[in-house]
Every structure is written in structure tokens, then in C-alpha cells.
Image (cartoon, helix red, strand yellow):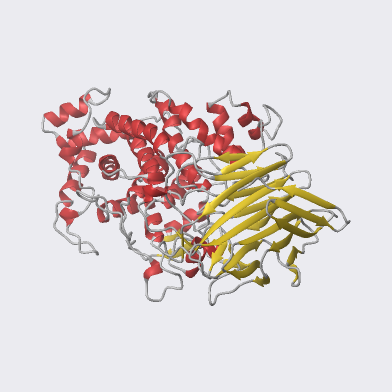
Amino acid sequence: MNKRVAVLGFCMMLCSTSVYSRNRTRIDERGPRLSDAELLGCLDPGLPGMQKIIASRDAGETVRALSVLVDFVRARREPADFGQRAARNPRANTAGARKILAHQFTSVGIEHTFGADIDWGFNPTTTPDSKYARDHEWTWQLNRHGAWVTLARAYQATGDERFAKEFDAQFTDWAKDCPVPVETANQRPYSKWRTIEAGIRMSWTWPSVVTIFRKSPSVRDETVLSLVKSMVEHGRYLRRHPTTGNWLTMEMNGLYHAGALLPFVKESAGWRDFAASRLLAELDTQVYPDGAQIELTPGYHNVALRSFLGPVDTAAAYGHPLPDGYLNKLERMFAYNLWVMRPDRDAPRWNDSWHVDVPSVVSKGFALLPHRKDFQWMATDGKKGEKPDHTSHLFPYAGQVVMRSGWERDALFLGFEAGPFGYGHQHEDKLGVVLFAYGRDLLVEGGSYAYDASKWRRYVLSSYAHNVVLVDGQGQARRGLPRRQYVSDTPLDLAFRSNDRYDYARGVYDQGFGSRENRPARHTREVLFAKRERLFLVRDTLTSLDGKPHSYEALYHLDAAEVDVDNAKGTVETRDAAAANLRIVPFCTQSLTTRIVKGQETPVVQGWMPRGHGIRGVRPIPTVVYECRSARPVTFLVALQPLRNKEDRVTEVFCEADKVRITFAGGRDLELTLPPN
């Protein structure tokens, strides 16, 4: 018996000693749960290179079989890149890797330094002295193991074995302290095995980590075996416990990658087939015919799209077929990004969304679908391909409407949400509008905030952070029903018209305010884009459903430092000498009051803007509140006029029935007829 085999056998004997971990977990409950015999038993005898291993196994030479398996795993050459290119990368985050050597981790933007012992179930936001609101994502995202990717890339760039030794120690610790759950999935707080994390580990972090570190002499043979065992456990866990929504796409992407990276395991082909067929089905289940993913959040739309794309590159690299029609079904998801895109090539920050690099996304779409010349046009900034054949766009299932003046970067853009609540990441924002013009945000909403238990998180989810109407001081209340009830099965009854003269859309909110059961009023909102005049009209009709008087507050959130207000007329104009501005001119059939709220925390949080998705911190912004009270139907109209130079400003608007008159400072009047309700 050679020295290496003897050492491996001695390490296996040590693992049978009965001790307790710091978490009082018995050694027989620690991971990986897969035994040596079970690992050898799941190998595929039909794969080249397995015969010698299986012969040793069948001869009872378990230690030798394991040793040969380690050699096989180390020597494999993956056809997919997975970040393991041999060229040195001077941009590798070696400073970040050195922090990880010191057990200094950052998760969801919060840094914590462990001592010699890393507690993978720890959460610094739940300690009594924490300065942060409770955020269970800290533990969950720590266990996605992005830190190990940083170590791997630093090792790849420098060849410094300290990074490999640290990975060996951390993985060994994690694998022992975090055994795979038995029987049911653990989706609870502090879990190291939420199915989303298991999917992300297999599709994003571990492929790079394994392919880079497995050849290091500092990564021990027993660590390589534990990696393989844990990957098998990940595959079985993901196969047993699929969920729904964007989580499912990440789970199946992870399962597919496990099947690709472990071809020597008998179950691997079944994992790939199951994952690919399930993803194919989900391209219909959770992607509307109009291309929108059912959570109605552009950021998570692209999380799902990336997960759907994961098997495409991997299958091509390994020579595995994908189901018929898979690529064709992806086309509408790419097209959604194109049609929803703002002039700055980003996507609206609807619901829990964030920055989306649309040209980069549609560039991938064109590579896969070369007949889409409009994708090529967007990916090349108009240098090649064909300009999209229309500007404004309706998503009839998602209930989202985009009105735009053109495809130029200084174009005018309004987004209108008039659809269902969404399958996940929902905000109480039906009938909300956002406005981007002349290269900047003019009318904004709360966007997203860290998924914690803070008042800021509650604020961005609420109607108070959106450009909607409150009734009796209460926001919309749709939350609490089974999620499938928030999905459209047929196109919505949503009015939309678009021609060279104008765009028009109409939606209705008649659900609860304050609670689902409290339905005091119906809100109908109409939006019209007068293209030649380059201004937008928003008309709200509020109808009492119980015959009683109600207070109505229309909110408009402005991304500006300062505003000018004419309290007598209610006219508001942002004041920024260096950028575009927005002028708001109101009309109401009832007595109207105007106030500006900025940076308010009581009696309700109002007038704030988060600094970015998942990032803690807010900044105050002026929020216009137009309020009236009536038992009779109220018609409330505002003109939204983007200003860039010395445009002829709107001074007055008037509405009677479907007739609108707009007066400009130069004395000109414009009359428009809105389509009938």
C-alpha cells in the first residue's frame, strides 16, 4: 500500500470517532452524509475511466478505489470554462481574498469577522447589540459561498497556495457542520440548505471553485472526495425538492450543472433530463405570452432568464441536447427586455428590481436568435441590425404599458403598471407611473430595499412609496392570497391605443385600501402621451362605493433636490439648472390642497428614496401630495411636462367629461379628447 492510500485510509478512520461539534451535532449527523461505499456505489460503470475504480471497489479495495477516483476527478478537463482559465488575471480581488483568509465576510452589505471558528449558521443582524434590522438573508447568502469564488480567482491569478489551503479548511468545516437535510427541504431562517442556495451553489459558485481548486496540492484528497459527495447530495436534494417561480429556475439550473459536472454518477443524466424538461415547462408556466416573467419584476425576470440560459451554454460545451423548442421559447423573454427598456438602456425599477444592462442581455439573445435584427440593433447601439418596428408597447398579460417618444437616449419614457399583483416580490403599486426623460429620472417610486425587517423595507413595499392614490390615508392591500391568484390566465381588460398622435392606456383598481376587505372606492387611471406636445396627462377618477365622503391623496415622487410650488394653483416644478426638470400642473373637480412631503418618518414614512436594491440607506426626496375630499365622484387630472430647455410651459389644464384643454404660457391652447371610459 502506498503512502498516499495509507494516509487516506487513516483519515477515513478518524472520521468514525464519536465527538460533538460546537453546535452539539453528533459526528454521525455531520456531513457529508453520503458514505464512501454509497459514493462508490453510485458510479456509472459505462463511463470511460470508471472500470479501474469499480474493479477495486468490487474487489473490496475501498481505499484504493477512492484514491483512483480522486485522481480521476483531479485529472478531468471540463469543456466549459467555469472561470478556471490558466492565464493570470491581475484584476482578481486579492485584497478581498486576504480578508477571507482572516475570516472577514461580507453578506448583503454587512461585514462580520469570525474568529478561528466559522459559524455558518450565525447571523449578526439578529444579535441583541446589532445596529441593523433583522435580515435573514445574511446567513442564507453567506452560504451561497461567493467568498470561495473570490478565493479561487485570487488563487488562479497568483498561484498563492494560502488561498487553496483556506478553501480546504473552510469547505471541510462547512461540509461537516452543514449536513444535507433529510426527508424535507429546510427553507427556514438560519438554514444553510434553502433550495435556492443549493441551486446557486451548483450553478454559480461551486463549478468555478471545484474546477480551479481541485488541482491544487493544498486541497487534500479527502476534501476532493467530500466535494464530490456533497455535489451528489446537492443533486439529489434539488431533484427531490423543486419549488416554484424564480427559485425553481435557479434550482433546476443548479441540478443541470450537477448533472454536467458529475457524468461519472449514474443519476447525472436523469438530473440533466429532469432539469431541462422542467425548465422547458416553466418557460410556459412562469413566462407570459407577452414575455414577462410572472413576478413582474424586471430584475428577477433576468434572474430567471439567466437560469434558463444556464443549461444552454453548458449543454453546448458538454455536447448534451436540449429539448426541442427550448431556444425558441426564450425569445419572448429577451424581447421583454427590449420593449420595457428605458432610454438609458436600463429597465424600470418595478417591484423589487435593480439595474438591468439591456444591451448586454439582448446581445446574448441575438447570438442565440440571429433572426432578431432588432436585438442586434440594440446590442450594437444602432450600428447594425434593424431599429425596433414600434416605440410604445403593451404587455397584455403583465398589464404593463410603456410609452416612449423614440429609441434615442434623450427620448421621453413613461411606464404604467396596471396589471396583477405579481407572483413574487410584490409592491402595492397598481396604476403607478414612472417617468424618465432627457437622460434622467423625473418621476420615481420607492424601488427596492434590503430584505430586512426595517421600516424602510415596509415603506418601499407600500403604496406610500409609489405614484398612486391613497384613500382615507390608506394604501392598496392585495397581499395575503395564494400566489397563483396573482397570475393572469388570459389577457387583461386593459385599454391601450397607440398611433402617431398619442398613446393612451387605462386601468382600474377596485380592491382593498388598508385591508383587502375594506373597499371604500374605485380608482380608474387614464394615461395619455401627447407626442407632438411632448407631455403626459394622468387622469384619475375616484368613485365612492359606499356613498360616503372619502379623502383622496395622489402622490408624485420627484427625483430632485428642490422644487418650486404655487400653492394657489398647485403647480409644482423641479429646479435643477444642470439637468432636465418636470412641471406638474393639476386640475380637480373638487377643492384641492397641495403639499410637499420630504424626509418624513411620522405619522407615516413618506418622501424617501432607497439608495439601491439590497443596500441599506435612504435619501429624502420631495413628494407631491394632492388631496381632496368628496362623497361624489372626483375627476383629478395632472399634466406632466418634461422640461429640458425653454419649453413653452403649461400654465393650466381643464377637464370636462372627455374634453381636456391645456393652456401654455405663450397663450396657446390645446384641446384633446380622451377616449371614452
Q: Position of residue 75 (x, y in %)?
A: 34, 31
Rendered image quadrant of residue 234: top left
Q: Position of residue 355 (x, y in %)?
A: 57, 49
Left of 370 or right of it: where is 69?
A: left
Which quadrant, please, contains the N terminus?
top left
Q: Residue at x 56, y 68 (%)?
A: 631
Can see residue 321? yes
Image mark count? 0
Q: Position of residue 535 (x, y in %)?
A: 74, 50
* Residue lying furthest left: 60
Q: Residue at x 17, y 33 (%)?
A: 41
Q: Nearer the viewer, residue 259 or 411?
A: 411
Rendered image quadrant of residue 359: top right
Q: Nearer the viewer, residue 633 or 29?
A: 633
Q: Residue at x 63, y 69 (%)?
A: 627
Vertical position of residue 95 compared to residue 91: above or below = below
